[in-house]
Amino acid sequence: MTDLLPAAGENSSGEANATIVVRDVVATYKVRSQRGGTGVANWRARLVGTVNEVHALRGVSFTARQGESIAIVGRNGAGKSTLLRIIAGLQKPTSGEVLAIEHPTLLGVDAALLPQISGARNITLGCLALGMTPEEVEQIRPSIVEMSGVKDFIHNPLNTYSSGMRARLRFAISTARTPRLLMVDEALATGDEIFRGRSQDRINSVLDGAGTVIIVSHSMASVQSMCTRGIWLHEGQVRMDGPIVEVSESYRAWAIAEDRRQRKLAQDRE
Amino acid sequence: MATLDGSAPALTSVHERTPLSRSLRDTWRYRHFAQQLAQSRIMASRTDNKLGLLWEFLNPLMTALVYYLAFGVILGTKKGIENFEVFLIAGVFTWALMSGTLVECSETLSKNARMILSMRFPTLVLPLSVIMRQLLTWLPMLVVLAAAALVTGEPLRATWLFLLPVTVLTVMFGAGVGLLLAHPAARTRDVAAFLPFTLRAWMFMSGVFYDPATRFADVGGPVGWFFHYNPGSVYMSITRSAFLPSVTVSANQWIAAVFFAVGMFVVGSLVFWRKEGPSND
């Protein structure tokens, strides 16, 4: 296991080029379970359900630096999206802290967009949601329309767009202004080849401005071309942190072995 | 970037609470977003209808008609009330403004959970947007109301100016109560489930279709006090008094109207703001 990090608690925030410091972040959810149980003794559980604790993150620490693009990899449910939301300041950790040079931008204006209104109106809404003034929105509008490539559809309601078009418009809006700290949940950043190139440009411009990009991804291929560093999250903990090539290689090897193991288990059961 | 070389930018916690003054300043900075969201939501709610924005007028008009049929014609609660049509419509619309603002403000956190989880903005923007939308839908109601008054022979009076303060006070009161409920409603769905029943009971006690001041004139004690100062009926009475000289609002009732509105609004906003920011569940 490679661990390039200073231990949690060390004064890593003193480093001159640190942009984000994640310190021993723990996240625990309370989830209402519907498993009712049987028997008279469990009447309460059957009536209102029971509350389960889910440990999404069990103490995650790392320091991101200027010009770094970091891929967070791991299986579904490893805590990747939770970690991203906590870094973006949208969710509070149960314990631990996140320090940053500015509020990181999570790519996801998606939630401000309304499907029944036109793309043009959604550009206004999305940009205002990012904190722009109406004047700034008008200045930046042509470049968003151009980057999204939706052209004549711009005055049609959003729910008439193809999913690719919607994704392009969303990405164009949320990166209209180059943030210094950009978080991307890859589930949001879908699109065709041309679009992928344009997103790479946007990510590069963040890195050129000495910012930091953190991408959550399932696809190793896209991550290897875009990122310099990898963090492998496994069951809420950092299993490996290092150069992207090493991390993705180890992760891939593990995933193949794990897959084989699962299949064998299933076969044995039959 | 300026901070690139030499002086490193300071690292601060991304989960730090913002002080009230900054929250208010941020909310003001986001006012255009609130306005755009209000307008867009109205448009979005009407695009699937053929009659589109005309519904903004049709909706209050038909509401008034249904209430008139139910209470004016069938149940006949109009006994002794002068110009029952305007009396009834003024009550129904004022109640709609108050309860609409209340319910939608209480839903701001539960219904926008996705938005709050994906973007960083002062959450006070959401109730601000609700208030703007309510005011936008209130305007057509006022037009219908004024038309009804003129058609039924009420002249244009100086008292119509009461409409301005009563609009502000009604919205402030509704928003204040709604803001108090927003966090509990986001925690448990049960709050939203109870609310409609509570509001309906409150509406019937507030005298939308009868005059509580005359009906319970000789009831004393706390019950009488309730029927006299209940904010629900006081705001309705003020709207009515703007059009109908037969409805009078006492100085004490005006004081109560201002007191409840300002008090609830300030308390509600503070409680809402105190719990602002990212949650941990």
Image (spheres, coloured by chain):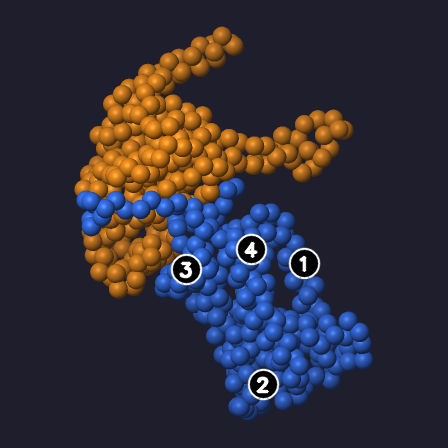
Chain colours: A orange, B blue
- Badges 2 and 1, same chain: yes
Q: Chain of mark 2?
A: B
User: Which amino acid type corresponds to the residue marked 1 in the rendered image?
Assistant: Phe
Q: CA distance from mark 2 to mark 1?
A: 30 Å
Residue corresponding to mark 1: B197
Which kind of residue does numbered mark 2 sit on?
Answer: Phe
Q: Is residue A200 left or right of residue B20?
A: left
Q: Is residue B112 left or right of residue A198?
A: right
Mark 1: few/some/many CA within 10 Å (<14, 14-19, 20+):
few
Disc 2 element: helix
Q: Which mark is residue B22?
A: 3
Q: Amino acid at mark 3?
A: Arg
Residue type highlighted by circle 4? Ala
Does label 4 or label 2 sit earlier along the sequence?
4
Q: Residue A222 at what x, y percent from top left?
A: 26, 30
| Residue positioned 59% across, 51% down in the render | B184
In the rendered image, the vertical position of residue B90 relative to residue A252, given as above or below: below
- Within 10 Å of disc 4 (Cα), the crowding (few <14, some 14-19, many 20+) is many
Query: Which residue is depicted at the point 50% across and 72% down?
Result: B138
Residue A100, numbered circle: none
- Sequence-first disc among 2 and 3: 3
